[in-house]
Image (cartoon, rainbow, N blue to C red):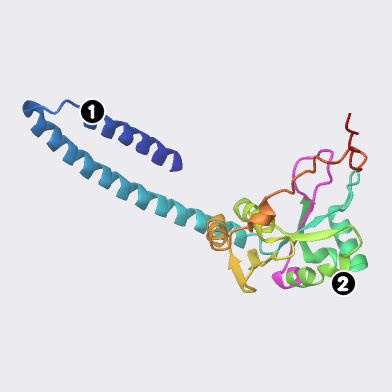
Amino acid sequence: MEELSATFTSRMNTYEEELKNVTSNEATHKTIASLSRDFTEFKCLIWKTMSALKMQVELLTVGLDRHEMSSRRRVLLLHGLPEQKDEDHVSRAVAVLTEEMKLPSVSAGDIASCHRLGVDGSRTRPLLIRFQSHSLRSEVWRSKTALKGTGLVFSEFLTKPRHDAFVAARKHFGVKECWTSEGKILILLPDKSRRKIESPAELQQLIAQFPMPAAATNKPALSINKTPTGKRPRKQAKQ
């Protein structure tokens, strides 16, 4: 839609310029005037149509994203667990939950499915854990602070648009001011209010409302009066 909008704008601007440059004699004036009115009406119609289509696409995208997020409500990702050859994913997940997080009641039967997420490579892949019940998933999520200092971290399995919005929000508002809960992104705003968002479009509205301070966007100037050792150069004696 954005590409179509840009193409339409470019073509219409070119057409308008051609209309302005046409020699305006009496024989062609009426034809050009009529053509100009038709062009204006056509442009308004196209813009209305494109706006309606864009709105429909955005609604469909949000609906699809919510549906996908709903299918992930019983899923958590475990990061930092080293991979082993021919590992039993369920057993390793249960070991972390019972031993590291002190949840002794959890068993293999509480896990619907478990596997590594992504393509095998040089980096350790997160372990995707789908629980049998949402209540157990919520209990594990509330107990994730027990992993502090272990190198293991739990995160929610966000859709790509939400993950991109979450990363951008942390970059703009700060890491400690942004977190997720039940698939939604919570942001502590500079005015100390909290806002819950689900899409990049909602984040853009917040960024426009709370722009990044100029001091945070400007890098400190490098001093040119220091040598590589950090000392100021000595002044040369006058001849």
**Left or right of 76 on screen, residue 209:** left
Camera-side residue of 95 and 236? 236
Corner quadrant of residue 216: bottom right
Corner quadrant of residue 79: bottom right
> Which three-letter amino acid code belongs to the residue tagged 1?
Asn
Q: Residue at x 74, y 46 (%)?
A: 221
**Residue under label 2:** 103
Query: Dot 1, crowdedness within 10 Å: few (<14), some or many (≥20)?
Result: few
Query: How far from the left and from the top, in percent, is residue 47?
Result: 32, 47
**Left or right of 73 on screen, residue 98:** right
Vertically, is 112 above or below 87?
Answer: below
> Which three-letter amino acid code belongs to the residue tagged 2?
Leu
CA gap, disc 2 and disc 1: 78 Å
**Residue under label 1:** 21
Q: Which residues are magenta?
A: 116-137
Which disc, if any, is residue 108? none
Query: How far from the left and from the top, in percent, is residue 105?
Result: 86, 73
State whether residue 167 appears in this view: no
Camera-side residue of 82 and 196? 196
Q: How many marks?
A: 2
Please tell me whether mark 1 sits on a helix, a strand or a loop.
helix
